[in-house]
Image (cartoon, rainbow, N blue to C red):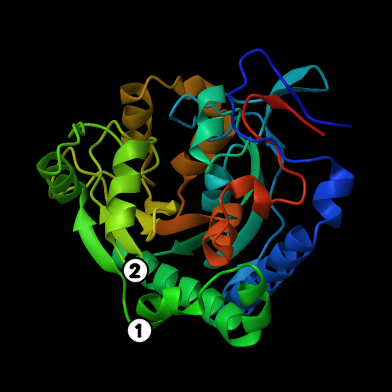
Amino acid sequence: MTPSASPAATTAAPPPSPREHLGSPVTRTVMRVQDRALTAAREYLRDNGFTELLPAIIGPVTDPGGRGSKQVDVDYYGHRYKLMTSAILYKQASLLGFEKMFYIAPNVRLEPPETANTDRHLAEFHQLDVEIAGAGRDDALGVVEGLVAAMVDRVVTEMPAELEELGRDKDAFADLLAGSFGRVTHGEAVADLRSLGHEQSADAEIDWAGEAILSHKSSRPFFITDYPKGSRGFYDREDPAEPGVLRNFDLIAPEGFGELCSGSEREFEYARIVARMRETGENPAKYGWYLRMVREGIPASAGFGIGVQRFVRYLCGLDSVWQASAYPKIPGLVSW
């Protein structure tokens, strides 16, 4: 079936038919790169004591999300359940049995149709989700650096012909593989953008245009840390020593590819989570199973999620993220 545009759809080029897309030499090469990168990720995490679990797909609640994306409801034996927009609540639950765990989890977010023009949004995508009991943010940053370097090194070392076939210069990863990633705070990123003439709010996420500006400036991935409270979900831990600032981070790829990963230390104390839910407009009554678990006690933790298709787009140097999906769902487009 040929994809067709809804009235709200944008002018972004849609993917071709399943026959054209899945039969394309480019798609086949990209999927082989994805397979090799995920193999490297699994090996790296298992070698460092992580256990892979299979993720939940539906539940009574999910990550409340952000930036205008909508959740998908399903009828679960007469109850309104949700398709997972992220695995965060189940990752915290998993720590009751596993101190270090990961998923490769599917996520469904009905992103605003205008995001079809960003070349970095899909309505259905996968995350490499990691959670670590007893960890702080710096611990999580260290795992991100090691994991990303392992995935990139595997592809650069074992698939030079495939990268050349895609027109991707493997030297683009030289700085990434040479050492640790850069770090700037959200406040420093805002000041940098304003100095360049970009009006970035100090109280919000870095907007997509600002993210692209910062990404183009860098030759290696870098972290943006310390986002302001109110810009993220209730589960990102507020810094006890600096109220109003979250102990979280994004990983930004160079060359204009933008955000690859988000993560944080987690709120794990019942009273703080309920207060944060109310501050963000969430009704705690919706989160019954989660809050009962939290009241009985869950470990402190930190974790993150790497967008698999965004990461593969960066690895392969693709124009758009849909090219890194075997079954692409572009926001605003009715597709196969």
Q: Amino acid at mark 1?
A: Ala
Q: Amino acid at mark 2?
A: Arg
- Is 163 on the left-hand or right-hand side of 252? right
Tag 1 secondary structure: helix
Residue sitting at the far bottom:
157
Q: Which residue lies under the disc numbered 1?
A: 178
What residue is at 49 percent from the left and 32 percent from the top? Answer: 65
Task: Say if 253 sits above or below 89 in the image.
Answer: below
Q: Report x, y in % for residue 48.
A: 53, 81
Residue sitting at the far top:
7
What residue is at 85 percent from the left and 44 percent from the top? Answer: 18
Q: Report x, y in % for residue 110.
A: 61, 27
Sequence order check, earlier mark of 1 and 2? 1
Q: Which residue lies under the disc numbered 2?
A: 220
Task: Say if 142 sits above or below 118 in the image.
Answer: below
Residue 329 quadrant: top right
Residues 119 and 304: in front is: 119
Q: Report x, y in % for residue 217.
A: 27, 58
